[in-house]
Image (cartoon, helix red, strand yellow):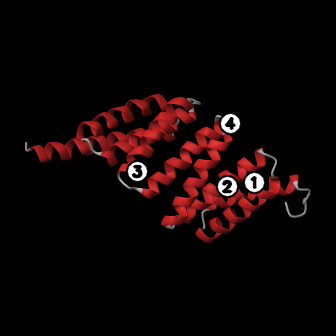
Amino acid sequence: MTIARQHQLKRAISSALYIHGIIEYNAGEFEKARIDLDESLQIARELNNPRLIMAPLNSLADIHCAVGEMEPALKIYEECLHISQQLRDRYNEAMYDNNLGTVYHYLEQYERAAALYQQSMTICRDIGDENGVSIALSNLGELALLAEDYSRAESYFVEGLTIARKTADIWSILANLNNLGLALTHLGQMEKA
């Protein structure tokens, strides 16, 4: 078998393991998912394929987050961010900034989370990713809620909701509506909430 065919076969195996790991992850079978994703990652690293590496890495970080293991998730998302920057992949750079922001948010490092959400939003605006902008705005609004800056939270949620409606992103619409209602309630605007 030629080297090129062996390479293609390994890539296909890595991709199949990744897909199987995602199915297991979605079924809540995190340990089984880790095994398949680790094997997918190992093959991707052997092939030295950065894009192939990022997929299982990201999913492994998601598993760490799902089970409350934030420190390993941080390291993995940072590796993904580094790879996306090396590839000049602005879309994934914005996504990993957002993911890192979410981990820092969970760790109650709110200033760091806000800076990462802002960075994600800036990149998303630059590349025209309106859904990414809406997500970043919603996350910034959640931080404003925690800081009891309800007017600023309202502003973030209204802008995020406007974008989510424009893009017909139902999950962002619902998240922004829910959070906007919380902000308005705290502002004493019960009828608007």
Q: Do the residues labelled 2 and 4 touch (CB within 8 Å)?
A: no
Q: Quadrant of residue 168?
A: bottom right
Which percent across, then down, holds residue 103? 59, 39
Reading the chain from its start, which is encountered first: label 3 or label 1?
3
The percent coordinates of residue 22 (x first, y second) are 44, 42
Q: Distance between the residues labelled 1 and 4?
A: 19 Å
Q: How far apart are marks 3 and 1 (CA)?
A: 32 Å
Mark 1 Cα-neighbour bin, 10 Å: few <14, some 14–19, many ≥20: many
Question: Residue 176 occupies which quadrant of the picture?
Answer: bottom right
**What residue did someone put label 3 on?**
85
N-term mark: 2 or 1: 2
The reply to whether callout 2 and callout 1 are in contact (CB within 8 Å) is yes
Report which residue position mark 1 lands on. 179
Kind of residue indicated by mark 2: Ser
Tag 4 or tag 2, which sits nearer the N-term? 4
Element assignment for label 1: helix
